[in-house]
Image: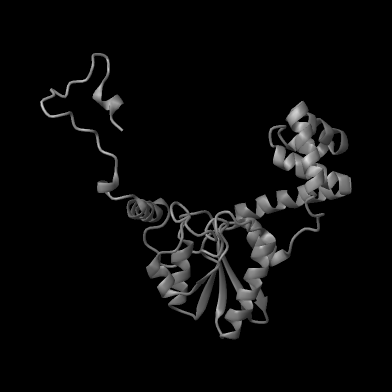
Amino acid sequence: MMMDGSRPRVIVIAGPTGVGKTAAAVALSRRIAIEVISADSRQVYRGMDVATGKPTFEERRAVAHHLIDVANPDDRYQAARFRNDAAAAIDAIQSRGRLPVVVGGTGLYIRALLRGLDPAPPADPAFREELASIAAREGRAALHARLAAQAPAVARRLHPNDHVRVMRALELARAGGVVVEQVDQHSRLVVKALVLLRAVAVDIPLAGHRAIAPRTGRRCRSSAPSRRTWPHRPRPPTGSTGRLPRGISRSRGAP
């Protein structure tokens, strides 16, 4: 919660999927004027409606939600972009005399908004292409060996097959080994913060899996094709017995 005098500037309701964060925000909206800013790395994408815990139509109608369905699945939506979008949404909500409530389970997004992002050099496409060539030619273990020589403490915490993080660590090591150690310490602080964050429960029935399971089932059924569009087992020709050759079961041959 970010305070401005006696009035909070922003309220954060955080926790894993399905614990009742959105229900808590809806319950809070019945008591004070709020608008919700989603801090979820999957809910930002259009079309990702199953098992992401997106608010239902009724929940969105009860309280305004922001930063949901704002990017296509092939777009890159990073923490820096979320921070900028969320900051703009906070200013707009406050200008309407309402209280912004950040609701979500992506700790990196919440940390970026509340504390800012760690200074780090941007990605170097040419250097990454060079590392990818080395990995293709000599194997991922070769990259991990390079990292072990430059930043052994970081290499001990990364598996050789975790090539994405190994490559990023090599990028940071190229800029300065101190940066790698510093970023690694920040990542452990974020993990600790995630353990402490919990959703606020305010007279909410059906919390946890009892709430998300029916919602996921409804969305799966709504997105499934009609039975008329499913492929059907071909009928045997007129006059045929419909028997299959010996050794072939109907269950194996049916689509």
Please state which of residues 71 and 243 is positioned toward the viewer in this rendering. Answer: 243
Q: Quadrant of residue 102?
A: bottom right
Rendered image coloring scheme: one colour
Q: How many labels does the image show?
A: 0
> Is residue 37 shown above or below 163?
below
Q: Residue at x 21, y 20 (%)?
A: 244
Residue 34 percent across, percent down from the top left? 51, 77
> Is residue 113 shown above or below 135?
below
Q: Say whether residue 150 is left or right of residue 200.
A: right
- Among all residues in the image, which is located at the extreme front? 238
Q: Residue at x 81, y 46 (%)?
A: 126
- The image quadrant where one finds the C terminus is top left
Q: Can I make out residue 85 in this image?
A: yes
Q: Say whether residue 197 is left or right of residue 167.
A: left
Residue 142 percent across, percent down from the top left? 79, 29
Q: In which quarter of the image is residue 57?
A: bottom left
> Is residue 247 shown above or below 226?
above
Q: Can I make out residue 201 in this image?
A: no
